[in-house]
Image: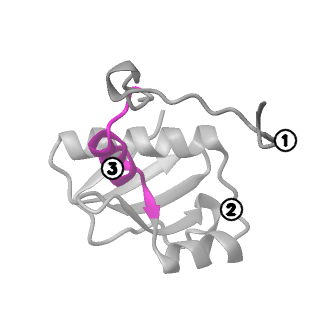
Amino acid sequence: MAHINGVSVPFVPIVKESQQVAKKPQTTGSTFDDLFKKELDKIKFSAHAMKRLETRNIEMSDTELSRLQDAVSRAEAKGAKDSLVMMDNKAFIVNIPNKTVVTALPIEESTDNVFTNIDSVVFAQ
């Protein structure tokens, strides 16, 4: 504290521009482009699919979502457009270019076991 005319004033040192240390922005190892691409690569669920998951009491764990994502990536690598992804006791119809699950159902609810408008089947591992 400095005293000016009997009043205590906090002392703030003056730092010349040449004495200031430039702070580099901290990075977490990922650029915006990396994060953006990662988000785009994630699987999405259409409103219809979300409704089917809810009405059919289908729950998805993080592990199952990861397996589904991997299955979609494998289908994409083979040039698939609309795939039936079979995982355990669940079936998903996925639009591969958009990475969007269109519908989902437990296999035991598939009454006639006929899936149309698909060009591939992928078994999630």
- Residue shown at the point (47%, 49%) measured from the top left: 86
The type of colouring in the image is one colour
What stretch of residues is rendered in magenta?
Answer: 29-44
How many residues crowd mark 3 within 10 Å: few (<14), some (14–19), many (20+)? Answer: few
- Relative height, residue 81 to residue 34 (above, below): below
* Residues at circles 1 and 3 in contact by the CB criterion of under 8 Å: no
What's the distance in space between the residues labelled 2 and 3, CA to CA? 29 Å
Q: Position of residue 48 (x, y in %)?
A: 50, 80
Q: Position of residue 110 (x, y in %)?
A: 55, 68
In magenta stretch: residue 36: yes
Q: Nearer the viewer, residue 27 or 42?
A: 27
Q: Label 3, on which residue?
A: 36
Q: Quadrant of residue 26?
A: top left
Question: What element does badge 3 sit on?
Answer: helix
Q: Nearer the viewer, residue 48 or 3?
A: 3
Question: What element does badge 1 sit on?
Answer: loop
What's the distance in space between the residues labelled 1 and 2, CA to CA? 75 Å
- Residue shown at the point (42%, 55%) measured from the top left: 43
Please name the amino acid that badge 2 sits on. Ile
Question: What element does badge 2 sit on?
Answer: loop
What's the distance in space between the residues labelled 1 and 3, CA to CA? 59 Å
Tag nearer the camera, 2 or 3 = 3
Q: Earlier in the sequence, mark 1 or mark 3?
A: 1
Q: Nearer the viewer, residue 70 or 41?
A: 41
Q: Label 1, on which residue?
A: 6
Please name the amino acid that badge 3 sits on. Phe
Q: Earlier in the sequence, mark 1 or mark 2?
A: 1
Kindly identify which numbered label has been placed on residue 58: 2
Kindly identify which numbered label has been placed on residue 103: none
- Relative height, residue 1 to residue 7 (above, below): above
- Residue shown at the point (67%, 46%) measured from the top left: 61
- Relative height, residue 11 to residue 115 (above, below): above
